[in-house]
Image: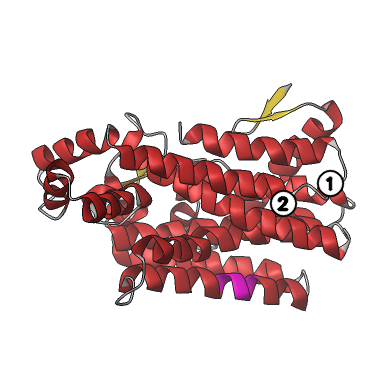
Amino acid sequence: MTVVGPFGLSVRDQALETDVQAGLAAVEAGLLEATKSEVPFITEAAQHLVRAGGKRFRPLLVMLASRFGDPYAPGIVPSAVVVELTHLATLYHDDVMDEADVRRGVESANTRWGNSVAVLTGDFLFARASHILADLGPEAVRIQAEAFERLVTGQILETAGPRDGRDPVAHYLDVIAGKTGSLIAVSGRFGALMSGADESVVDILTQYGERLGTAFQLADDVLDIASDSHESGKTPGTDLREGIPTLPVLRLREMAERDRRPEDLELVALLDGDLTDDARHAEVLARLRVHPALEQARRDTVQYAEDARATLAPLPECFAKSALEELCDAVVHRAG
């Protein structure tokens, strides 16, 4: 059993491990090449998050999905570069919207260079991703465009909030299906599609990516509350401080409205106060860490990961399928 990449996936086959490592190395080289500019300052800003590292979760999924066709097909590595560039671009924009100070353990681009540079750098990465896509053909362009539309729609829905009468949890799950699930679904789809896998396999791996992507984001939500370190690549409680309604908070509000327990109502009142105050923020974080709402969010994460695993059932038994199943375990493990 060998561990592959920062995400910590265990691979039980030497040939698969070697090929995945080689593919991820090629993606890394492709990311550095795609983020070069004739203007040195743009190169520095564009490579800021590339060099900070990351799980490379999406490229890893592309590599594994490609094993159901020809894993050496020429479009696989470029398509993995595209999804990771797109993901990186959204991080630059997210950090501006969230006024984040830290990303992947380093100073965020907006903190270092200001909001304008961060937004424009994200745009630069989108442009470079589009340039690579053009060489992959019109179908790839269409798939990416649809995913990007869903991603932006998810962000807008998050900003707008649920409409009157809409269940906030259902609304939030729609948000993260767009913001996170869409691009992870494309990772599975590109890997299978570029490898020439059967259409049914492409559909399965797209659905798998969608569900795993939701589990992945829910695990991040749990980490934002439960982590004592910077496991998520952000300062713990960042979403909480910024007032982002992640699943543990939504589950707390749901319980408070349903059960009307005084301690829950008090915690909701604290949440609705000024969480830029360090003492209040620390108290809310400590109380949420021992609240049943956090455990409910963990159970929700497990359910989506299990749904993703069940999607894989029709695929033939092989080491790549086992690795995809283990990704479900890895996502759940992140949530504790």
Q: Which residue is mark 2?
A: 311
Report if residue 50 is visible in the image.
yes
**Which amino acid, mark 2?**
Thr
Q: Counting residues from the N terminus, which is met first, the one under dot 1 or under dot 2?
A: 1
Question: Is the stretch drawn in magenta largely helix, strand or loop?
Answer: helix
Discs 1/2, front: 2
Position of residue 86 in the picture relative to residue 63 (left or right): left
Viewer-closest of 265 and 143: 265
Q: Quadrant of residue 319?
A: top right
Residue at 55 percent of width and 39 percent of height = 331
The CA distance from mark 1 to mark 2 is 17 Å
Residue type for callout 1: Arg
Front-lying residue, 256 or 37: 256
Report x, y in % for residue 118. 37, 61
Q: What mark, if any, has residue 12 been given in the picture? A: none
Q: Which residues are magenta?
A: 144-148
Image point 35% across, 53% down: which residue?
Answer: 246
Indicate the quadrant containing the N terminus: top left, top right, bottom left or bottom right.
Answer: top right
Horizontally, residue 216 falls left or right of residue 108, namely right
Among the 4 quarters of the image, the one containing residue 162: bottom left
